[in-house]
Each structure stands twice: as C-alpha cells, then as structure tokens.
Amino acid sequence: MSLARRVIPCLDVAAGRVVKGVNFLDLRDMGDPVELARLYFAQGADEITFLDVTATVDERSTTYDVVRRTAEEVFIPLTVGGGVRSDEDVARLLGVGADKIGVNSAAIARPPLLDEIADRFGSQVLVLSLDVKRSASTPSGFVVTTHGGRTETTLDALEWAREAIERGAGELLVNSIDADGTKAGFDLELTSLMREISSVPVIASGGAGSVDDFAPAIRAGADAVLAASVFHSGALTVGDVKAALAADGIEIRT
C-alpha cells in the first residue's frame, strides 16, 4: 500500500451527463463527463472514478462510449462502475479504456462474480463499491444498499467487505449515503471501521464540503479521498485539496 494518499474526483453519470444530488436523491445536471474529467486531470487528480448511477436501476449496461471518450482524454487510472453484471462486462470496459472496475449490486446478488473477475483479471482490477447507510439492523450499525442507494439489504457492511476481500476485491470504495452530498464531512466512524477490517486500500466517499474535511478522513484510515459536488461546483479544485493535505503533513502524489 502506497504511503501517498490519493485525491479522486468522482463523476456520477446518468444519461451521459454528470449529475449530483443529496443522499443519492434529487439529481441535478453538473456538466459533460469528458470535459470535467479533462479539467480534473489538468488539476492534478490522481485517478478519476466514473459511476453510471442509473445503470442498475434502469437494468442496462454502462455507457461505453462515454467511458471510451473519457479514457482518451485523461492519462491517469480510470475506475468505472455501474451496471457491471459479468466478467464479460469487465472485459468490455477494460477494452474501452477503464483501468479498474467497481462492482456493487450484481456482486451482492451473486457473490461468486467477485471471484470470477479477480481470477480472470486480477485483484488490482476489482473495486468493491459499497453504498452504506447507518442502521440498527446490523451488528456494526451499518448496512449495505443496492440500486444506487434505493434498496436496503440485510448485509452488514463490514461483514460484506470482509467477504469481498476474501473473494478477491483489491480495493474498497466506501460511500456513506447518509453523508452523500451534505457537505458536512466524511463519515469518520465508517471509514475507521472499514480500515480496521480491511487488508486492501480504502477510499472514503460522501460528505466532503471544505478542504478541512479531507485530512480527518485520511487520519481515520482512508488511503484515498473521493469527492464530487465540491469539485463540480468549482468550490474546490484538486489542487486546493492536495495543498491542504500537504500542509497537514500528509504525503500526497505530486
């Protein structure tokens, strides 16, 4: 695991446009994904995460053309998720320029999918995407959801993360639905609990509102911090976040 922490803009895409809401609801248009990816690449982003947030809900595949055009414009790792249901979907996404693949709902429906992807392409390609809510129904107090946060499962978030790592997941993208879009800061308790059980990198997602929110997430155990609306709105740049982290004594990639 690299000591340098990563800053990752996230492009939540629906119908070919970047969207953003609060708690995964009331999505509004934030711009063209290719243009935004190009901007964040120029700002010094370490990676770009592209999530087709309605692919599973609409029961369709990820928009391959948008992924291809994005990959042609940025020369940093591109993680793509949304609507991935088979190792053939993964092969096709890698073929149009993705570097890593995020899997969520389909893996919950059929956990061996994780084994199949890791066995065929390697754990470095496989990112378990977790959309997590606080819930008294599970031992950890956190439950996994599917379909863009719309459907609550009975899975304890920590237990599912453990199982996914055993099946070959090489990274955990942990998104707090409770914090998503609120700009009130990352869920530090969730991040810390995931760090305790994880042998692979943890990406904290959901809740970034100011430059002061990122260092606490890393100190809670995140290997990378992911944000969307603060970047899309222009409130912060990737450079702003990296400068704040460096000033706080956190090693970043330059």
Image (cartoon, rainbow, N blue to C red):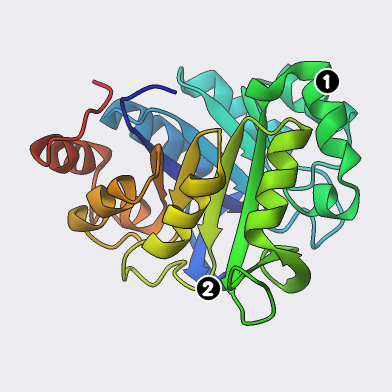
Name which residue lies at 72% across and 58% down: 54
Q: In this view, does 21 lie above or below 106?
A: below
What is the number of the mark on residue 234? none
Indicate left or right for 119 with 141 as reference.
right
Q: Which image quarter: residue 137?
A: bottom right
Q: Is residue 17 above or below residue 87?
A: below
Name which residue lies at 50% across and 69% down: 21
Q: How far apart are marks 2 and 1 (CA)?
A: 34 Å
Query: Mark 2 falls on what kind of element?
Result: loop
Indicate left or right for 158 with 213 as reference.
right
Name which residue lies at 49% across and 47% down: 196
In what quadrant of the picture does the C terminus appear? top left
Image coordinates of residue 160 in percent, x first then y, are 72, 53
Indicate left or right for 100 with 219 as reference.
right
Tell me if I can see residue 14 in this picture.
no
Name which residue lies at 33% across and 52% down: 217
Q: In this view, does 56 lie above or below 83?
A: below
What is the number of the mark on residue 119? 1
Q: The disc labelled 2 sits on which kind of residue?
A: Asn
In what quadrant of the picture does the N terminus appear? top left
Give the labeled residue for mark 2: 23
Sequence-wise first label, 2 or 1: 2
